[in-house]
Each structure stands twice: as C-alpha cells, then as structure tokens.
Amino acid sequence: MNILHEFEYFKPKSKKEALELVKSKGSSAKVLAGGTDLIIQMKEKMIKTDAIIDISDLEELKGIKCEEGKGAEILACTKLVDIEFNADLKKKYPALTYAVSQLGSNQVRVMATMGGNCCHSSPAAETPAPLSALGAKVVLASLEGERELAIEDFIHGNRKNALKEGEILYKFILPEPVKKSACRYGHIGLRNAMEIDCANMAVNVELEEDKATIKNVKLVMGSVSIKPLVSEAVPKVLVGKKLTDELIATTGEAAQSEAKPISDVRASAEYRKDVIGALARRLVKEAYEAAKEA
Amino acid sequence: MKKQIIKLDINNQIYEVMVSPTDLLVDVIRKQIGLTGTKKGCGQGDCGACTVLIDGKAQLSCLMLAIASEGKKITTIEGIANQETGELHPLQQSFLDHGAVQCGFCSPGMILSSKALIDENPQPTEEEIKHALEGNLCRCTGYVLILEAVESYVEALSKGEV
Ligand SMILES: Cc1cc2nc3c(=O)[nH]c(=O)nc-3n(C[C@H](O)[C@H](O)[C@H](O)COP(=O)(O)OP(=O)(O)OC[C@H]3O[C@@H](n4cnc5c(N)ncnc54)[C@H](O)[C@@H]3O)c2cc1C
Ligand code: FES
Ligand code: FES
C-alpha cells in the first residue's frame, strides 16, 4: 500500500512558474503544499496523478501580514506552526490560532499549510469554520489574474472546491474584527490530539454600544454537513437580544435543528447532534462574555 | 521509472543517492543510506516513529518525498550524539537514566521532537512539552517516564549542567 503511483516531479522557482505549470499540466497534475493530505491519498490510491508541482518552498506564497487596524493576510503556503505561534494573529484572531493548534500534531503542523487544509475541502477540516466565522476571503490566482471569494463559497464540500483548472489558492484575507466582537472555536473528538473532529464550531458575536445587546452573530459548524454550515437559525434567535440562560438553551436547539450529520466510524449522527448543541451553548456564551471586554 | 541522482544533507554529511520521485524520505534514509535509527511505523503520519529534523523542525519522513528534501538540513537520531566522541546527547542520556526507553521503537522520534521543541523554547512548560509530543505515540506507554526524562533535561539545561 505504501507504493506511490509513478509521477513526474516539478519544483517551480517562482509563483509565475508555478502558475504556468499548473496551467500547462492541467488536471493531470496535483499541487503539493505540505503533502499531509496529498501523500496519504496517493498512498491509499485514492488519487493518481501524473505530475506533482511542489509549491511548498515558494517564499512568494508564504508569510503573514497582520497590522493594527488592517485585518490580516495569510499566504496559502504558510506553515500551520507559523500561524499557531504568530503573536499578532493570536491577539487579533485567537479562535483561528487555537483551531490551528488543534490540527493534527506538531509534526503535521510543521509540514501542513492552511491552503492545503481548505483546498482538501474535507467536511471535518479544522480551519474553514473559524475562517468563515471571521468573514475570511480567499484569493485564487492564475496566469489570467486573481479573483476573490468568501471562504464558504470556495468550499463546495466532500473534497470539492471552486478552484478551476490553472488556478491555485494564493492567500487568505481576514477583515479587521469589529469593535465589541469576539470569536471562539471549539471541537469535540475522541481524544485530545491527532483525532479527526466529530464536530467543530466557530461563533463570532458582535455587541451593540451597550455591551449587552447582540448586534450580529455568525455561527459556523464543521463536520455536520458536506461543507461548513453557516447557521441561519441562530442569528434569528439572538440578534437584538441580551443573552440569557433561556436563550442559550434555544441557541443550542436552533443549531441542532440545522445540522445534518452523518453516522460514521467516528460518531453516530445522534451523538453529533448532541455535541453540536453543547458546543453552541458553550461557545455562544464564551464569545458573548469575551465581546463585552473587547 | 525515471530515476535521478539527488544530494541529501543528513547529519552534516552529503549523500548522493539515486531516487525516483515516488521514493519517500524514510525509505531512502533507512534502506539506501542505512541509517535505521529512523523508524517506520504507520506510514500515515499518525505515530511519529519516522520523525526527523528538517532545518531544525520535527517532520514526518513517511509523508515527505526524498526528492523534495534536497537542499535541506536533515538530522536523524544518529546525528545528535557527539560525532567525535560518540557520547550520547544529554537528552538521549536523560531518556536512558529515567527508563524512558522500553522497546525503543518510539524513542528516536520522541527524542527528536523534544529536541526541536527545546532548541526553540529552552524552558517549555509541561503543557508545552505534551503539545509538542502529541504526534509521538508510545505503544509501550511509558509516557510519564518520557515526560520526566524531558523535564529533567530541561532543568539540567537551565542550571547549566549540560
Ligand atoms: C496525522 C494527521 C493528522 C491530521 N489531523 C488533522 C486535523 O486534526 N484536522 C484537520 O483539519 N486536518 C488534519 N489532517 C489533514 C491535513 O494535515 C490538513 O488538511 C493540512 O492542513 C493539509 O495541508 P497540506 O499543506 O499538507 O496539504 P497537501 O496535502 O499538500 O494538499 C492537500 C490538497 O490541497 C491541494 N492544495 C494544497 N495547497 C494548494 C494551493 N495553494 N492551491 C491549490 N491547491 C492546493 C493539493 O493539491 C491537495 O489536493 C491530518 C493529517 C495527518 C497526516
Ligand atoms: S511512520 Fe511516519 S508517522 Fe508513523
Ligand atoms: S518504548 Fe516501545 S513504543 Fe515507546
């Protein structure tokens, strides 16, 4: 099983050269970033590819810009450890750096990238839910130019996404968090580390000037549908209200009513629904309390 | 399959090896170069037995193409002892002193993951050590002793004893 199907290996020296290769090789090639999904899929013969285009060492695709008042930009091939331990990101987007710190193991995070996590487009992935709750966009690049998409429009689910032939994911753009807002992430798996989430969730709460009334809330669930699911019911429950224990309970039920989890080796659909309720209750409360201080 | 010669920098020595693009670093290190301290367990990124340091960071050689590691500094467990005297690295010695080695299959990975952490953060907390070792499984389950071995090395380091 550990024998890979034959392929040609290309290591472009610039983003432009990478884009030329991605275009000329088309669907016969796969881009390699950290390889932590790709190599496993190749080993398991889930995919066969005639060519690998290794973009893992392209400095033009790596880096984090996170300045006061200006949101952040994270290039696609930035290693997850560099996101996890970036002090500016940690301060401004703790939900994202926490989610990243929960992905795989240290070795996996040293190798893997956020671009790879989103392009793999697995329903259980760690970073799409917090990225979506934070209002992140992706920039896709090709020889023809660039286009921008909201993260939830990029991921179509079950390993499918909006990338067209000749395109790569170039970077993530995160808006500056609005005042009196806070985002929190949580996940439930079978053990502490290295598990694949049986459900995950990110919640972003924004308060009115009175620091009590909810102005906006975005709740995004992972692992309960083929793609990250943005709740429509939860904002209806919470917007314009002050958080009470009763509302917290209703929030849990609202999130549960929308989740469409499956049963698989990791958990039954029923258990996943319970977990969604528990995560929603906990995270809404945590984000609400944090937003008061923000 | 088209093979080509690549140069790998392993433990400060340059090895010229003939590889095909599909060859994984773990197999080249073990079978072609003959450094069998690096272990292959799951081959899936789960166990950490195949951990090596690449440019100082702990990475999984079972998920790394050999050809993609050309031009990087690779350190295996054989490379951390004193190359002249053969004396063990004090972190290795600490594992022995604390009985943190049972069958030994996980030890090279455990030691290299710990070393990568401490090289970057010489005073890690217990939580930080656990977080850094999450990806190294020990089937003999000597986790407590392993943690003690790492903590004792950290302490010796802070006192300037090693
Ligand atoms: C032991 C282990 C544990 C794991 N645990 C978790 C976990 O807890 N949570 C989780 O979410 N994931 C987990 N993963 C999965 C994986 O590590 C992540 O999804 C990772 O972020 C993938 O990034 P990568 O850079 O390695 O991607 P790669 O494997 O290099 O690429 C993945 C896919 O995306 C494509 N791609 C990558 N970058 C780009 C780009 N810039 N443009 C276009 N296409 C691109 C590739 O062609 C490929 O199809 C785990 C993996 C392992 C081996
Ligand atoms: S052999 Fe590489 S992680 Fe198990
Ligand atoms: S000592 Fe046997 S696996 Fe750890």
Image (tube, coloured by chain):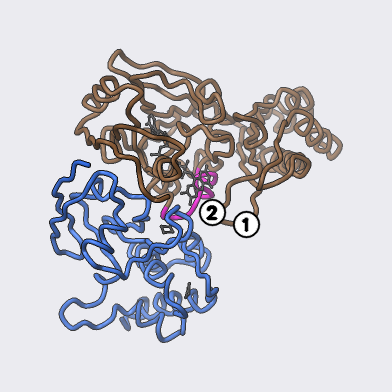
Q: Amino acid at mark 2?
A: Met
The answer to whether residue A69 shows anywhere in this view is no
Give the spatial CA distance, label 1 vs label 2.
8 Å
Viewer-closest of A257 and A132: A257
Graded by Cα atoms within 10 Å as few (under 14), some (14 to 19) or many (20 or more), the crowding at tag 2 reads some
Asked if disc 2 is less than 8 Å from ligand 1, the answer is yes
- Please say if A280 is above or below A155: below
Q: Which chain is blue?
A: B
Q: Colour of chain A?
A: brown
Q: Quadrant of residue B110?
A: bottom left
Residue B104 location, x and y as percent?
42, 76
Mark 2 belongs to which subunit?
Answer: A
Q: Residue at x 28, y 23 (%)?
A: A25
Task: Pick the residue in front: B162 or B47.
Answer: B47
The answer to whether residue A147 is left or right of residue B33 is right
Estimate the x, y position of residue A248 in percent, counting from the top left. 80, 37
Residue at the disc numbered 2: A194
Name the residue rendered at 52%, 26% in the picture.
A155
Relative horizontal placement of residue A201, taking residue B29 as reference (left or right):
right
Q: Is residue A60 visible?
A: yes
Residue found farthest to the front: B1
Contact between marks 1 and 2 (CB within 8 A): the answer is yes
Residue segment shown in magenta? A97-107
Residue at the right extreme, as displayed: A246
Discs 1 and 2 lie in a common subunit: yes
Quadrant of the drawing holding the C terminus of chain A:
top right
- Identify the residue position indicated by label 1 in the image: A191
Image: A68 above or below A21? below
